[in-house]
Structures are given as C-alpha cells and as structure tokens.
Image (tube, grey):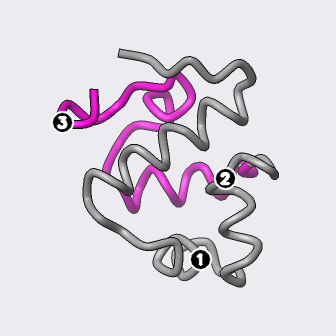
Amino acid sequence: MTTSATTLGERVAATVRAHMGWRRLPVSELARVLGLGQRAAKRRYDGVRDFSLTELERVAEWLDIDREDLAAGRMPERAA
C-alpha cells in the first residue's frame, strides 16, 4: 500500500512516520540516527524539510527497510 502524499519528500516523510509509529520510536531517536538536533529531525519527520540521500540511507538502515520502499511509500504491514 502507498501513501497519498504528493511529492517525493512528503511520501518519504509519511513512510518514515508510519514505520516509526509502528515501532513506537520517538523523534529523538531519529535525531540521534541522523546526527541532528531534535528540531531539525522533527522538520524532516513532519515533511517540512526533505531528507538528504545520505539521511535516507541512514533511516532505511536504522528501520531495516529498503531505500526504495521509503521512496515508494510502502508502509509496514501493520500500518497499512
């Protein structure tokens, strides 16, 4: 299943939120993984600012999902 987000950045952010929510991971953990402050991580989480390619790779590895799944908006089974 895919999200209804319209841009690639929105789709990635929505997918990250779904995977993090499914695992009950806080934004503070995303900030730690990305090496960012919590405010900067929250902007990416909310889709206000796009993830860089390097950040996308880090998030995919952290969440143990393919980068392509993030970009395609594939949700975890329980969130779908």
Q: Which residue is located at x 56 percent, y 17 percent?
A: 4
53 left or right, relative to 64: right
Disc 2 residue type? Answer: Asp
Q: Which residue matches tag 3?
A: 78
Counting residues from the N terminus, which is met first, the one under dot 3 or under dot 1? 1
Q: Nearer the viewer, mark 3 or mark 1?
A: 3
Q: Nearer the viewer, mark 1 or mark 2?
A: 2
Q: Residues within 10 Å of mark 1 (few under 14, many from 20)?
A: some
Q: What is the secondary structure assignment of the residue under circle 2?
A: loop
Q: Which residue matches tag 2?
A: 46
Q: Residue 19's x, y, as percent?
A: 36, 48
2 left or right, relative to 38: left
Q: What is the secondary structure assignment of the residue under circle 3?
A: loop
Disc 1 residue type? Answer: Ala
Which residue occupies the foreground of this view, 12 or 56? 12
* Magenta extent: 51-80
Q: Residue 26's x, y, as percent?
A: 43, 73
Residue 1 painted magenta: no
The CA distance from mark 2 to mark 3 is 21 Å
Disc 3 residue type? Answer: Arg
